[in-house]
Amino acid sequence: MNKFKSKIVKVLATSVVLSTLLAGCGGQDKASSGSNSKNEQVTLTMLIGDTINTPGFQEVVKNIEQDLNIKTEIEIRPGGPEGENIVKTRLATGDMADLSVFNSGSLLKTLNPEQNFVDLTNEPFMKNIFDTFKETVTDNGKVFGAPVSSSQVGGWLYNKRVYEELGLSVPKTWDELMANNAKIKAAGKTAVIGSYNTNWTAQLIILADYYNVHAQEPNFAKDYTAGKAKYAKTPAALRGFEKLEDINKKGYMNKDFNTTTYDQAMKLLADGDGVHYPMLTQVLPVIADKYPDKINDIGVFPQPSDSADVNGFTVWLPNTILINKKTEKLEAAKKWVEYYVSEKGIAAYSSKSKAIGPNVINGIKVADDAYPAVKEMMPYFDSGNVAPALEFLTPVKGANLPQISTEVGGGITKALKGAQMYDKDVEKQAVQLGLPGWK
């Protein structure tokens, strides 16, 4: 864990995807600028999650068609367990698109990468991608994916304008955060936005707490993988479930949290009607696109621990672009991915969408016009107060955490019971994966 954390700090501390062009991509220009225009146009199909289709992504797709004469037919799937099941079904039935975007880390391993995706280990365009990322898309010693965006953090998005109006300061402890919530509620605003209609969003309070778990239990990931550590039996890990329950018990969420969607939650935050949204920073470009006059009002802080001395971000590595092993257009698919991570591809992406966190490709500089929230997170990277999310440190992640989180966050299930349910859920996957130390 300490080795992985050290690597994340070294490679991410000073590199953020911004509107600057990628430097140091020697050997890529010739390949990535090659045109397919003299040949018949190739059409590739691509399956992506609903959060991937940003203006930056769309711009790269457009440029690929212009420069390589490769057209991309995009199909949007939902996120969370529903989207995961769609991907698994499509793979099982042989109906998978030529290209797809999926989670890196533990969830990717559930797709049997070696069976389903093209090995990219020796492709020249992979040379400039950080090993930290490649480790999260490696199975049986082979690398299967390229990054679709920058890394990001999980934390508490907050409306800085409302914070200023109410005289609030960024909290360093959970008690301070709850005190802020009380003042926000008293002012007639929603203190914590819940968007449980999009159920994967319910788990962020638990997942974003992992930095605090690691700070107290540095061996948790290793012991968890070995079946020795459990959420319900580790006070530091159980605390995330307790925090989720705490928010509900004190009535800090919007009354319609069960029917509020991810998109509606972002509007509440941007408008300042909701002041906190526990979420990944992937929301930033969406807010910037839909509410450009309000993006500078949005900041982010780490999920607080119970001690002001423990304060840092949980980091998510990017989702990954994968090539279907059964594609009949392999050469075009490789050219597509090569272009995406090339100087031209990054320039196109950055011209329409800014970073949501530090990047995982060499040679990218920090720009002055970064989102305020991204600038706000960088001191934590500079000081080393970051840790990768648990799903990047272990192959074990239960499929039902979103549903369990909605029950705990919705007041249906107590925190301890929820943690016990998740431990059972995790056990099923660990046994499926054949991990030693599990039943």
Image (cartoon, rainbow, N blue to C red):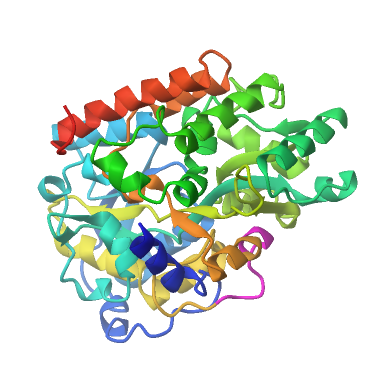
Where residue 345 appears, as percent x and y from the top left, is 40, 70
Camera-side residue of 123 and 58: 123
| Residue 416: percent from left, percent from top | 47, 21
Q: In this view, does 159 lie to the left or right of 7?
A: right
Determine if residue 273 is in view: no
Quarter assignment of residue 438: top left
Instruction: From this view, report whether residue 43 is shown above or below residue 102.
Output: below
Percent coordinates x, y for residue 11 in the rendering? 42, 72
Q: Is residue 373 magenta?
A: yes
Note whether 297 is above or below 70 in the view shown. Answer: above
- Asked if residue 307 is positioned above or below residue 86 in the image, the reply reads below
- Left of 262 or right of it: where is 132? left
At 32% from the left and 71% from the top, the residue drawn is 129
In this picture, which residue range is highlighted in magenta? 366-374
Q: Is the magenta stretch mostly helix, strand or loop?
A: loop
Q: Position of residue 208 (x, y in %)?
A: 51, 44
Counting the numbered discs, the total is 0
Residue 146, by quadrant, is bottom left
**Viewer can see residue 339:** yes
> What residue sits 51% from the left and 69% below the top?
17
Which of the image's four quarters has the N terminus?
Answer: bottom left
Indicate left or right for 334 with 79 as reference. Answer: left
Query: Residue 342 in magenta?
Result: no
Q: Residue at x 50, y 65 (%)?
A: 358
Q: Quadrant of residue 363?
A: bottom left
Q: Which of 412 and 361 is in front in this view?
A: 412
Q: In which quarter of the image is the C terminus?
A: top left
Viewer-nearest residue: 196 or 51: 196
